[in-house]
Every structure is written in C-alpha cells, then in structure tokens.
Amino acid sequence: MLHINNVSFSYKDIPILENITFSLEKGSHLSIMGESGSGKSTLLKAIYGLLDLNSGEIFWGKQQVLGPNFNLVPGEKYMRYVAQDFNLMTFTSVAENIGEFLSVFDQENHESRINELLEVIELVNFADVKVKNLSGGQQQRVALARALAQEPEVLLLDEPFSSIDQFKKNELRHRLFPYLKEKGITILNATHDPNDILSFADNILVLKDGKTVANTSIEALYQKPKEKYVASLFGQVNELPISLLKEYTEVDASILIYPHEFEISKESGFEVYVINNHFKGGHFVIEGLAENSQTVFFTNPNALKIHARVYLNVSLQLVNKRMVHKN
Ligand code: ADP
Ligand code: MG
C-alpha cells in the first residue's frame, strides 16, 4: 500500500500542497486530475522523494519516502517518475536506450525484454533508430519504456501522453495500461485528459489549488460531481439555477447537467433560443440562450435553426442527483 498522510508542501512561503491524505492498494491505478497549476506534478515529485515536505509522511509499505535532505540521490529506487523532460541518450538507438536499464544479471533475456517493451510502446520498427531522429511523441514513449525496463513497483506518470497525437494516444493507452495492470505495477497518472481515465483508472483524485476536492471512483465522480470544477474534467458541463425548471422556481440552488442529458421538447420545459450549432461528428452541440441570459449547451442529432425556440427538460432523477446547494 502507498500511504500519503497529511502531506503539505510549499515553495518558499507559498503553500502548494495542503493536507493531502490518501492511500492506494498495490497494483491499482489512480488518476490525479486538476487544472494546470493545481499541484499534480508537485504531488508526484513529493511521492517520488524529490521534495522535502513541510509536514506529513509518505510510506510505501513499511518504507518511508524521504526527501533530498535525507538522501544523497533523491528518488526512490522502487519507483519511476516519467516526466515531460525525457532524459534520453539521444545519440544512441531506441533499443540501447531501453537496454541500458535492464538488469545486468539477466543478460540472456535482454533481447526478449527489449522486444516486449518495444511492443508496449509500439516502436518495434524503430529499435535501431537513433533517439534524436524520433518525434517528441516517440521520445516520450521511449522514456516510458526505459522506466518500465527498471521494473518499478510504482510508476508515476506526469502527463504521459502530452506529446503524442490523438490517434496514437488511444492505441497506446489500450496497450500500456492493461500491461501495467498485468504486471501488478501501481500507477499514479497525472493528466487532464478525461480519455486517460475513463476506462482505465480505478480511482480519481481531484486537486484544486493544492487541496483534494474529491477522491472516488470515476462513476461516482461523473454521476455526482460536487461542483462544476469536478464535472468539467469530463468536458463541457452546464451549471444552471434550478429555478429555471418550473417546479423549482423558489429553490435557490444550481444543477450540473452534461449537454447530452437534456430532453428536448417542442412544447414544455424551459425555453432556450438557439444561437449556434457545433458539429461534433456523430451529433451537434447546440448553443442556446435561456431566459436568464445564460448560455446552455445541449446535444441534438441534427443542427437546429438559428433563432429557433426549443424547450429543454431535466429528469427528476437528475435533479435529485445533481442539485448543488449554495453554501
Ligand atoms: P500542475 O502539475 O497541476 O500543473 P504544479 O504542481 O506544476 O501544477 O504546480 C503547482 C503550483 O506550484 C503552481 O502554482 C506553480 O506555479 C508552483 N510551482 C511549481 N514549481 C515551482 C517551483 N520550482 N518554484 C516555485 N513555484 C513552483
Ligand atoms: Mg504538471
């Protein structure tokens, strides 16, 4: 188990992480989400032992992670931290970059291990290419394979697919995450891409200004986000005063609704005035204006006439689930 107990950290006097507490089973996959600057990278660095904490402690099983003040070479051996700076040997080949970190006591398996890892990162045909001749995204994948060559128990990924194009990203996720699961490697994955988490992470930790705002399963987070900040991690979301719905005109609360959750009607519901259509491939996201002048996004199979009036409805079930009361 990884235990993060009440961890706080500041740069000079500016608090960056405040009282972070969570634990993680061996072999599980945690996504760390949050807007840019919310403290994701700082948290990963703290866990890896690159920072001296102001307070709190970090344990992997019985071993305590200690910062640079306590270690000549910061960074724990049983962990690997893959950051955005790839730290590769650019004048040697992909295979040599990976092989450098394989155990010297296991020479006879080197070639098959290198091949296995090349397959995970989908660079089998690039084994003999010098790293300097690869694209940024390919170099990022080599950095990942180098980390895996060291057989870490814990893998800390800091926006691991940031340089990789959308098409390749999907393939890679489907190959990498099941591979890590199979090997029983514990993953902490800092990302702001919802596609990284939707099908792979067991839990999501959401950071906002260095504080934990949620730590739960993806389903729970999606179905019952406590605030718009959390719901927005999944893409576009509407936060509307519930008084727009006729049964709730007296209630002072808001409601979080994803665009695809409205039911559209020609007769009843709250009225919106269509101002724009956004083509999304399989459907359109329609931008409408509600009577309180608020913009509302909803989906429809087809584009709607600009200036048309439609009525939107929200099911009772959603109202109950997504009502956010003012403090
Ligand atoms: P994220 O990875 O979520 O984008 P970071 O952990 O990189 O966020 O940064 C969190 C906060 O810490 C930001 O406000 C950032 O400006 C600040 N920060 C990061 N690194 C340093 C540093 N070396 N010195 C001072 N402030 C820093
Ligand atoms: Mg970061």
Image (spheres, helix red, strand yellow):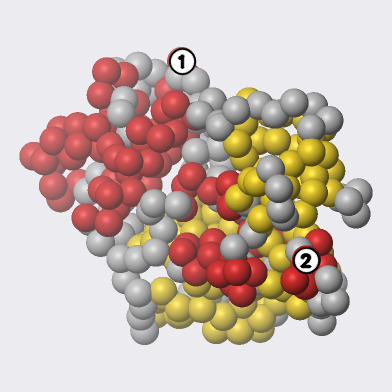
Q: Quadrant of the C terminus?
A: bottom right
Q: Earlier in the sequence, mark 1 or mark 2?
A: 1
Q: At 15% across and 33% down in the image, what residue appears? A: 111
Q: Disc 2 beta carbon < 8 A from ligand 1?
A: no
Q: Name the residue located 66 percent from the left edge and 81 percent from the top edge.
A: 19
Dot 1 crowding, Cα within 10 Å, few <14, some 14–19, many 20+: few
Identify which residue, 76 or 105, lies in the foreground.
Answer: 76
SS at circle 2: helix
Number of the label disc, if any, that sits on residue 249: none
Query: Which residue is under mark 1?
Result: 133
With 320 as the anchor, is 273 left or right in this view? Answer: right
Pointer 2 local density, CA inside 10 Å: few below 14, some 14–19, many at least 20: few
In-front residue for pair 45/24: 24
Does residue 73 show up? no
Q: Residue at point 46% right, 68% down?
A: 217
**Closest to the observer: 192 or 68?**
192
- Of 122 and 321, which appears nearest the observer? 321
Count of residue discs? 2
Q: Which residue is mark 2?
A: 246
Disc 2 marks a residue whose amino acid type is Lys
- Looking at the image, residue 143 sits to the left or right of residue 93; the answer is right
Q: Position of residue 17 (x, y in %)?
A: 69, 71
Residue 20 against residue 289 in the figure, above or below: below
